[in-house]
Image (cartoon, helix red, strand yellow):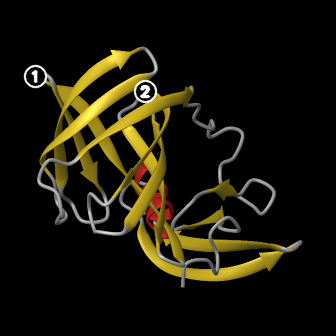
């Protein structure tokens, strides 16, 4: 199930709402999903991150944003298509029989920390949401405490700079490129 997957559905969560997504499931059990919502003339987008796994024929999707886990039964239709049916889902649905098909469009590749370590504008980590910034800092700076977060513009691109205090009392700065989502969806 690792890889880049796309899907869509209409009228299943909310009557008149169309939703499409691209989900990247990494081999390490993490995921990022980008949603696009359309209802009438209005369009919006969002992103979620979390963990995924399969166990006893079920697919589990833990969301970092709310701490809840969705559970789906699934059927592999062929090497590029998987059909999901909700069994336990965190948000309300118009349809209690929520089903969708994900189609594999590519392989997931994670940037290595040596390429982009967040140490400067040039080495800023490209992310798709503010929660991903905190997830990265937590994973790469054990015991660190947030000191400050600021917005910066450099060469026409937008950055969040997070400064943390390390357990030894020193400080470390992390640069995140937020150009892909800054000012969108508000």
Q: Dot 2: within a 10 Å radius of its alpha carbon, few (fewer than 14), some, or many (20 or more) residues?
A: many
Task: Work out whether residue 37 or residue 52 is closer to the camera in this orientation and state it.
Answer: 37
According to the image, label 1 marks what residue? 56
Q: What residue lies at 52% left-to-right and 65% top-to-bottom?
A: 129
> Where on the picture, by quarter, is residue 57?
top left
Task: Work out whether residue 79 or residue 2 is closer to the camera in this orientation and state it.
Answer: 79
Question: Residue 155 location, x and y as percent?
Answer: 89, 72
Q: Secondary structure at mark 2?
A: loop
Q: Secondary structure at mark 1?
A: loop
Question: Residue 111 location, x and y as percent?
Answer: 63, 38
> Where on the picture, by quarter, is residue 176?
bottom right
Question: Residue 116 location, x and y as percent?
Answer: 69, 46
According to the image, label 2 marks what residue? 2
Identify the residue at the far top of this view. 79
Task: Work out whether residue 53 or residue 93 is closer to the camera in this orientation and state it.
Answer: 93
Task: Work out whether residue 182 or residue 72 is closer to the camera in this orientation and state it.
Answer: 72
Residue 68 appears left or right of 50: left
Q: What residue lies at 43% left-to-right and 14% top-to-bottom?
A: 79
């Amino acid at each position: 199930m690792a890889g880049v997957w796309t899907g869509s559905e209409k009228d299943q969560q909310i009557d008149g709402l169309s939703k499409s997504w691209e989900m990247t499931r990494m081999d390490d059990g993490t995921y990022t999903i980008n949603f696009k919502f359309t209802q009438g003339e209005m369009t919006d987008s969002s992103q979620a991150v979390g963990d995924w796994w399969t166990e006893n024929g079920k697919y589990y999707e833990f969301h970092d944003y709310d701490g809840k886990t969705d559970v789906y039964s699934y059927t592999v239709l062929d090497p590029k298509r998987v059909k999901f049916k909700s069994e336990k889902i965190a948000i309300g649905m118009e349809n209690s029989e929520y089903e969708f098909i994900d189609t594999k469009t590519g392989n997931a590749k994670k940037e290595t920390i040596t390429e982009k370590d967040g140490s400067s504008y040039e080495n800023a980590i490209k992310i798709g949401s503010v929660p991903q910034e905190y997830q990265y800092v937590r994973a790469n700076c054990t015991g660190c405490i947030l000191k400050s977060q600021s917005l910066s513009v450099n060469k026409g691109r937008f950055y969040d700079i997070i400064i943390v205090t390390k357990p030894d009392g020193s400080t470390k700065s992390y640069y995140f490129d937020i150009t892909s989502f800054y000012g969108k969806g508000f």
